Amino acid sequence: MVTAEHARTRDEIVRLAHRGLSVPEFARAVGSALLRAVPAEGSCLMTLDPATMLPTAEFVENGLPAAEMLRLVEIEVREPDFTKWTQLARAEHPAASLSDATAGDLDRSLRQREIRRPAGFADELRAVLAGGTGVWGALTVFREAKRPHFTPAEVQFVSSTAGLIADGLRRGLLLDAARSGLDDVGLLVLDADNGVSMSNPAADRWLDELGAGDRPGARMPLVVPAVAHQARAIHGPAPAPARARARTRTGRWLTVRGSLMGDGPHAPVAIMFEVARPAEMAPLVAGAYGLTDSECRVTELVARGLSTKQIAGRLHVSAYTVQDHLKSIFAKSGARSRGDLIATLFFDHYATSLT
């Protein structure tokens, strides 16, 4: 059941994701927003390396000391336990409570017995923060001893916000990377009239590669002011993500994101350009080749590198059903293998032939 507080918090998270915040600022703001909708004593947002699922930084409110956090990471990486990040990344839903996973017996969890209970903590609610480009973070909210366990409704709410938080985290990581001079992330700052007030060399390259088209008087690709307009509309009653995919003149696909650099509809907007990853192209592939919803989902999971067995587990179907879907996808797309599907379908064939 979605409460009014849940709805307000969800809208607030959407707006926070488009505020152009750094990762530490975003982590603190999201933690505060979530704790109003899902009461708890503290929170921890970790950034993860999507290639290895190893933590790269942590932003903790009222959590464990550094030494205990290192032991938690060791358990996460090397020892069996419940609701580990890798398990949640493969699960149907991105969030779960420790109380539900242990059937109410929290001490079945190694980290609970060894670290969390001695520190005075009881139930925890974990979520992986994943998008089309991988798992970029992990979120935990936790309660102290003698507090009630997290309810299924609270778990469902956090699960429903995980993708939004992942989007905001990815924006923060991209902004931080662009500000630090990473040469493949484009950063463009537009003033209130959509004039360019700042751009880095990568943004200049992407603008040139996108081109302004044949519109009379066009100064920049149409996708840029369109995303900027959506970013400024984030203060409306039904905020929607300011994000679009665009094909360059050389056939590459970019993800274009917009984030406000202040308050109000006249605030500057940061536009970020990033090469689109295979999983992000799955919705476009579905429309182009007439894939069914199930085939589109299988295609997306193939692009994320999951095996047939893992896809079957994620979709709750048999491995034979997955193989049938793959045969149909190959027939419709002309691909001959999984690698062919990713390399040819997403990039070479889709980017040139279909557009």
Image (cartoon, rainbow, N blue to C red):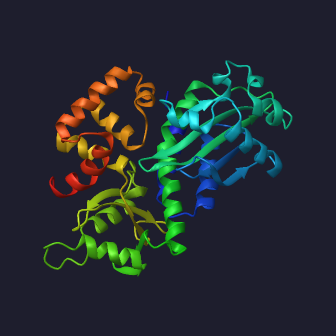
Task: Assign the C terminus to one quadrant of the image.
Answer: bottom left
- Residue 347 in which image quadrant: bottom left
Asked whether, in this view, residue 9 is left or right of residue 227, the answer is: right
Q: Is residue 57 above or below residue 130?
A: below
Residue at (61% x, 60% y) in the render: 25
Asked whether residue 9 appears in the rendered view, the answer is yes
Asked whether, in this view, residue 248 is left or right of residue 238, the answer is: left
Question: x, y (%) of residue 259?
Answer: 44, 63
**In the image, farthest residue toward the front:** 336
Q: How many marks?
A: 0
Residue at (35% x, 65% y) in the render: 228
Question: x, y (%) of residue 97?
Answer: 63, 29
Asked whether residue 291 appears in the rendered view, the answer is no
Closer-to-camera residue (274/152): 274
Closer-to-camera residue (289/230): 289
Question: x, y (%) of residue 286?
Answer: 24, 40
**In the image, farthest residue toward the right:** 118
Question: x, y (%) of residue 211?
Answer: 23, 73
Q: Is residue 323 above or below residue 225?
A: above
Q: Is residue 251 above or below residue 165?
A: below
Residue at (40% x, 81% y) in the render: 197
Asked whether, in this view, residue 115 is left or right of residue 6, the answer is: right
